[in-house]
Structure formats: structure tokens, C-alpha cells
Image (cartoon, rainbow, N blue to C red):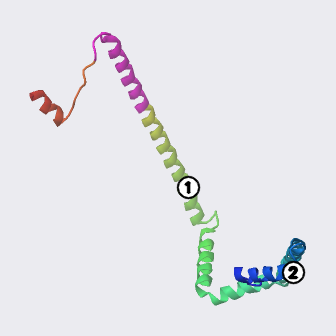
Amino acid sequence: MFDLGFAELLVIGIVALIVVGPKDLPVLFRNVGRFMGKARGMAREFSRAMNEAADDAGVKDMAKTFKSATNPVSSAMDGVKDAAKSMTDFDPDSETGKLAKERAEARKKIEASAARKAAERKAREAADALRKADELEASMQDAPADAAPKPVAEGPAAEGNDKA
């Protein structure tokens, strides 16, 4: 607001210390702080009142109109958006509306079929996993308790170990 730096504030503080004295200096600074707070509050209230008056007068609407008039790209994009919206708003009884309805029904059928196939695949995979788990449990019960299972090595590294 006043654009005072640290050096200016230090000079003001020293002058105030000399003029007012150390005894009354805290009271002076407290009063100056209150005054500054009230001044900022009044400035904030004034700014808010000015903004409200501008809103009531329609300044924002005029600024928006002016901005759109000075920015032709934005105006062109608004026109394209309006045209696209008018193309998607069609009469349900027209040929386009009937075609859109048919496509929506076909899409629903495809989605239902895909969901059913996915569910069947997952059920099949779950049954396979359950059967494999049963086989492994059965093989664990058939093996003697004192015999340790031998590690099974696969791949090219295992072939080299067999020859050694």
C-alpha cells in the first residue's frame, strides 16, 4: 500500500522512539495497527461496494460481450459448438431418430453378450483353478510325510545340470 521497505520502517521506528519515548511506544504502535486495520477494512468494503455496483449496472455482461467481439476464434468455436448441438438434437420420429434408436438397441445387445461371455470365461477359469487345486491337494495327501519333495528345474539351465 505505502510500499515501505525494511530500511524505511527502521527509520520510522527510530524517529518514533526518539519523539514519543520508549514508555509510550507500544501504545503508539498498537494505535497505528488499529488504524491500519480499520483503513484496510474500509478499503475492502469500498472495493466490494464498487464491484456490486458494477454487477448491477451490467458491466460484466458488457465486458463478456466485448471480449467475445475482440476474440474471433472464441466466437467461431461457439458457433461450431452450437452447430454440433443442433445436429445431435433430432426428432425421434424421423429416420435419423429411428436409426439412433436401432443403434442404441444393438449396442445394448452387444454389451450384454460381451458381459455374458466374460462371465462364462471367468466361471470356466474358476472351475479350472478349483480342479487344479483339488489335484494338488490330492497329490499332497498321497505323498509320504517323511519324503521331501524334490525341486523341479525347467528350461536350458536344468538340462546343463543333468549332464554334470
Residue 126: in magenta span: yes
Q: Nearer the viewer, residue 23 or 43?
A: 23
Query: Would residue 110 appear left or right of 75 to someone viewing this image?
Result: left
Residue 130: in magenta span: yes
The location of residue 159, given as percent across then percent down, is 14, 32
Q: Secondary structure at mark 2?
A: helix
Location of residue 157 (image quadrant): top left
For mark 1, what is the residue? Answer: 104
> Mark 2, residues whose alpha carbon is within 10 Å: few (<14), some, or many (≥20)?
few
Location of residue 51 (image quadrant): bottom right
For mark 2, what is the residue? Answer: 46
Location of residue 154 (image quadrant): top left
Q: Nearer the viewer, residue 67 or 151?
A: 151
Name the residue rendered at 52%, 44% in the picture: 112
Name the residue rendered at 28%, 16% in the picture: 148
Q: What's the distance in space between the residues labelled 1 and 2, CA to CA?
A: 57 Å
Q: Nearer the viewer, residue 108 or 7?
A: 7
Magenta residues? 124-148
The location of residue 58, given as percent across then percent down, is 81, 83
